[in-house]
Image (tube, grey):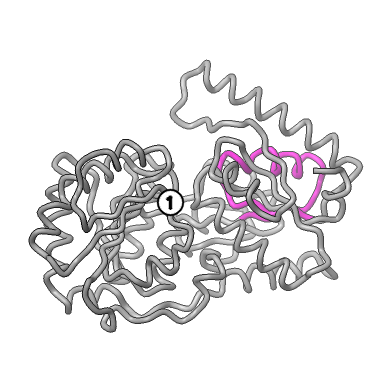
């Protein structure tokens, strides 16, 4: 990235996982459509999902070798702090001259260098917190933000002193369309299994045990299983049913979700928002060690809307997946009831409207 690409730009930052990165992309795409002459750039981490997707994209970007802090040893935390300081210092040195117009952060450790550099230089910054419980980075920098856009009302009470506004969770433009209804899908019906963009070993292993009896019991069903890039080779090489398709990553997620009658997934905020937009019911298995247990809170929120069934990660997870999946695969009415009408998502529009009000003439 040249120095000029940061000057007067909107800088988007957020990553580590798809739940942080894809909302940032959705906001950037919306901003590019609304303000086509406004420079846009990304800052992220080499280790995160953005380290894979940004180099393939058209977005100017800078990636830093930074790491997360949660669950690390003292030595690892010291190393992560050094890498963060170095990345922040590099951005500050550039932004003192080539000052961005604003920084928009969607959380995750990959967002820390840009948000901390913006705060120290007095550059306006905005945050989006998709989850029902805020991440540690958002908690630490929320009071200095021009605005904290919240995916759910529940998070506002957990950010005292911050200028919060509930907008929902930004989703990719491919989800901002009409979706076919679950009741209109015909056999062979599809069960979509998502462990998250990085994969989920517990779900992958449980599904490998649950899939054969499910597919034998329901010959008019098939399974599309996103195993994650790190897990794909191991999972794919294991014996599996001919109607069990295993892939490392699904690019056209909107199409995969639309073709599915039921979804099994982790409960990251982006996935929950996309399920609502597509009108697809899900069996949600929250990541048990997610920060502040936010995935469980996300799943509970979707459950209260009767859009999801929550299953805890536990011993004999395969048995629980098989039982809950079978009850919906066998019952058309149960699938239709869980797969409610798609919910319109206006999060990108609401965020950009607010951004324009705060920053004035863009």
Q: Which of 36 and 166 is in front in this view?
A: 36
Extreme top residue here? 75
Q: Position of residue 72 (x, y in %)?
A: 47, 25
Q: What element carries label 1?
A: loop
Which residue: 52% across, 59% down? 156
Q: Callout 1: 10 Å neighbours few (<14), some, many (20+)?
A: some
Which residue: 23% across, 39% down? 238
Q: Where is residue 302 in the image (x, y as percent from the top left)?
A: 34, 65
Quarter residue 191 falls in: bottom left
Quadrant of the image containing the N terminus: top right
Residue that numbered label 1 is attached to? 249
Extreme front residue here? 242
Which stretch is magenta? 102-127
Q: Is residue 349 magenta?
A: no
Q: Is residue 125 magenta?
A: yes
Q: Where is residue 175 in the image (x, y as percent from the top left)?
A: 49, 71
Q: Where is residue 254 in the image (x, y as percent from the top left)?
A: 44, 68
């Amino acid at each position: 990235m040249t120095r000029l690409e940061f000057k007067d730009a909107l800088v988007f930052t957020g990553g580590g996982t798809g739940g942080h990165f894809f909302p940032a992309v959705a906001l950037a795409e919306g901003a590019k459509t609304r303000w086509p002459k406004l420079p846009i750039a990304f800052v992220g981490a080499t280790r995160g999902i953005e380290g894979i997707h940004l180099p393939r994209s058209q977005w100017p970007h800078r990636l830093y070798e930074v790491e997360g802090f949660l669950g690390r040893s003292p030595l690892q935390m010291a190393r992560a702090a050094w890498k963060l300081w170095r990345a922040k210092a590099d951005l500050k040195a550039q932004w003192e001259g080539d000052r961005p117009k604003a920084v928009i952060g969607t959380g995750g450790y990959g967002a820390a260098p840009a948000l901390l550099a913006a705060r120290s230089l007095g550059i306006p910054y905005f945050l989006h917190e998709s989850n029902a419980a805020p991440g540690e980075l958002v908690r630490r920098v929320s009071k200095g933000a021009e605005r904290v856009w919240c995916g759910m009302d529940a998070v506002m009470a957990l950010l005292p002193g911050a200028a919060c506004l509930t907008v929902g969770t930004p989703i990719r433009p491919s989800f901002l369309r009409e979706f076919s209804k679950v009741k209109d899908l015909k056999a062979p019906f599809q069960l979509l299994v998502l462990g998250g963009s990085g994969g989920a070993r517990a779900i992958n292993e449980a599904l490998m045990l649950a899939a054969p009896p499910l597919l034998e019991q329901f010959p008019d069903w098939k399974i599309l299983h996103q195993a994650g890039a790190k897990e794909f080779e191991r999972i794919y090489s294991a014996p599996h049913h001919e109607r069990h398709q295993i892939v490392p990553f699904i690019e056209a997620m909107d199409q995969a979700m639309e073709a599915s009658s039921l979804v099994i997934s982790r409960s990251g905020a982006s996935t929950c928002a996309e399920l609502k937009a597509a009108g697809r019911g899900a069996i949600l298995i929250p990541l048990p060690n997610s920060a502040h247990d936010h995935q469980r809170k996300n799943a509970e929120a979707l459950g209260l809307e009767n859009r999801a069934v929550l299953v805890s990660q536990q011993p004999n997870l395969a048995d629980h997946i098989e039982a809950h999946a079978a009850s919906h695969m066998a019952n058309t009415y149960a699938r239709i009831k869980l797969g409610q009408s798609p919910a319109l998502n206006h999060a990108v529009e609401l965020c950009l409207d607010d951004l324009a009000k705060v920053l004035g003439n863009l």
